[in-house]
């Protein structure tokens, strides 16, 4: 049939977007109709989402999308994992916390007192990350939890406001720590053992299923009716849908704020080796498993640049990377996954402290600092891509880089060099494309398996190839 259109809402680390996708058997095109800020706000009690303002921007963007094309039949929402809002009826009980808020340390302690990581991993298959939803809930205000009907992950919360239907989309649910890796269902025993009410966790829905039609009020405000479709609402799950994997012998890196480095497998890998190598088994679209590790990602670089800009210095990322590429002397390769790099703050000072503690010379000039960050990321990406292959039984002969990091030539080249295999970079917009493709398939605009969807991506978005160099 003729191509049709769907709308993707993608809420990323610094901005949110509404993107209209036009999809058909040989067509995959996107138009960004709205872009708006998505900056966390520090309140006296910690770091929060600015969710009401954001929802207003989402509505305005959707109005734009629906006005521009009367045939937008479906809307899908994705964002980063783990964060949630507590709702009582439709009312939000306080602005949701941002996962980089340091309160989660309390939750980790409380949960691990009774459920150490080995015990949790056997059930939920997740890498230990201090911000996983179960730790956030353990640090939550008990009175608010008692009042709440549900704890809804952010995309689900937006879907709830749009439709009145409270659902939890499965790929994002898999990042809460409260879903069983083996069955893909809520872990009722763990939920009870942690003193949480099962009511908090709304019924599960899979990507491609309908969440609901826009409520009459919302449809009225937007000037059109549409259906909200569940997508891989975990942004990384959507990004992995749109990795143009040409063969099974490949790893992927979804590289934005985080570098999510892994392979796709059919079943969760719950071995001791996987746990010790800090791998996670997150739920993918069509029941696939994303066996990956969270690597700190471009966050360290962008937070470094933001720090310099806060000090009033004129720094532009493109110029900085050019200067970094021109650095000739070797620079320090530090452990990007050291937890000290997780919260916002002075990254160059933390890098210098890490280098001091490890007896290596800290990078000094801005160009050296940027180069050191890129080299350190590239080394982690290369190591983890090969480790993922070993743990997941995949012979990694090529590494796909998708997301904003695909634009970073130095990072792609150095990842290829350090991994000793080619890097295929792109698409940059993988998350939005994955969101769009799952909706398009549900709407009957395209059909087939994930492989067919990926083939459409490969035909319409040619990746850029970086050959590994030696020496
Ligand atoms: C990437 C991401 C990642 C999560 C983190 C919280 O945006 O969703 O997959 O671990 O944010």
Image: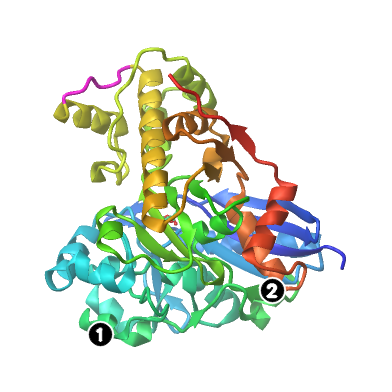
What segment carries the magenta color?
359-364
Q: 283 or 200: which is nearer to us?
A: 283
Q: 140 or 30: which is nearer to us?
A: 30
Q: Hey, which quadrant is residue 241 in on the image? A: bottom right
> What is the x, y in percent for residue 71?
81, 68
Residue 327, placed above or below residue 42: above
> What is the x, y in percent for residue 397?
51, 43
- The C terminus appears in which quarter of the rendering? top left
Q: Hey, which quadrant is residue 210 in on the image? A: bottom right
Q: Which mark is residue 442?
A: 2
> What is the x, y in percent for residue 105?
20, 58
Read off the residue under disc 1. 192
Q: Does the magenta-highlighted stretch encompass residue 181?
A: no
Q: Hey, which quadrant is residue 201 in on the image? A: bottom left
Residue 464, placed above or below residue 189: above
Local SS, label 1: helix
- Residue 328 seen in this snapshot: yes
Question: What's the colour scheme?
Answer: rainbow
Give the left or right position of residue 469, taking residue 34 as reference. left
Q: Earlier in the sequence, mark 1 or mark 2?
A: 1
Ligand 1 within 8 Å, label 1 CB:
no
């Amino acid at each position: 049939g003729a191509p049709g259109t769907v709308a993707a809402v993608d809420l990323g680390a610094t901005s949110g977007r509404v993107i209209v996708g036009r999809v058909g058997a040989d067509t995959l095109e996107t138009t960004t109709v709205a872009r708006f800020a998505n900056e966390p706000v520090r309140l006296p009690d910690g770091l929060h989402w600015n969710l009401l303002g954001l929802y207003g921007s989402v509505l305005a963007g959707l109005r734009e999308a629906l006005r521009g094309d009367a045939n937008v039949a479906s809307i899908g929402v994705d964002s980063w994992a783990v964060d949630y809002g507590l709702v009582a009826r439709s009312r939000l009980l306080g602005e949701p916390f941002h996962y980089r808020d340091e309160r989660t340390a309390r939750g980790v302690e409380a949960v691990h007192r009774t459920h150490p990581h080995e015990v949790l991993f056997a059930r939920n298959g997740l890498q230990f990350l201090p911000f996983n939803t179960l730790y956030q809930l353990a640090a939550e205000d008990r009175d608010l939890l008692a009042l709440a009907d549900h704890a809804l992950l952010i995309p689900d919360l937006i879907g709830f406001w749009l439709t009145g239907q409270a659902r939890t989309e499965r790929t994002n649910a898999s990042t809460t720590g409260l879903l069983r890796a083996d069955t893909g269902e809520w872990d009722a025993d763990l939920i009870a053992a942690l003193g949480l009410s099962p009511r908090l966790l709304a019924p599960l829905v899979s990507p491609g299923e309908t969440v609901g039609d826009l409520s009459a009020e919302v449809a009225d405000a937007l000037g059109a009716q549409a259906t909200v479709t569940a997508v891989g609402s975990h942004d990384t799950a959507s990004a992995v849908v749109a990795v143009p994997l040409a063969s099974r012998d490949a790893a992927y890196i979804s590289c934005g704020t985080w570098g999510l480095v892994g392979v796709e497998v059919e079943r969760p890998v719950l071995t001791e080796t996987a746990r010790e190598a800090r791998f996670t088994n997150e739920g993918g679209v069509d029941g696939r498993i994303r066996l990956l590790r969270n690597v700190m990602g471009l966050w360290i670089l962008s937070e470094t640049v933001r720090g310099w800009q806060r000090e009033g210095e004129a720094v532009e990322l493109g110029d900085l990377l050019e200067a970094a590429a021109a650095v000739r002397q070797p620079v320090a390769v530090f452990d990007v996954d050291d937890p000290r790099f997780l919260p916002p703050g002075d990254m160059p000072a933390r890098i210098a402290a890490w280098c001091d503690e490890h007896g290596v010379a800290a990078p000094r000039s801005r160009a050296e600092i940027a180069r050191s960050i890129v080299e350190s990321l590239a080394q982690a990406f290369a190591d983890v891509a090969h480790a993922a292959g070993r743990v997941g039984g995949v012979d990694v002969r090529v590494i796909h880089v998708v997301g904003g990091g695909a634009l970073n030539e130095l990072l792609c080249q150095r990842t290829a060099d350090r991994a000793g295999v080619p890097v295929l970079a792109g698409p940059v917009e993988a998350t939005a494309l994955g969101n769009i493709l799952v909706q398009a398939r549900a709407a009957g605009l395209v059909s087939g398996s994930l492989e067919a969807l990926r083939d459409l991506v490969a035909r319409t978005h040619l990746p850029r190839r970086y050959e590994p160099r030696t020496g």
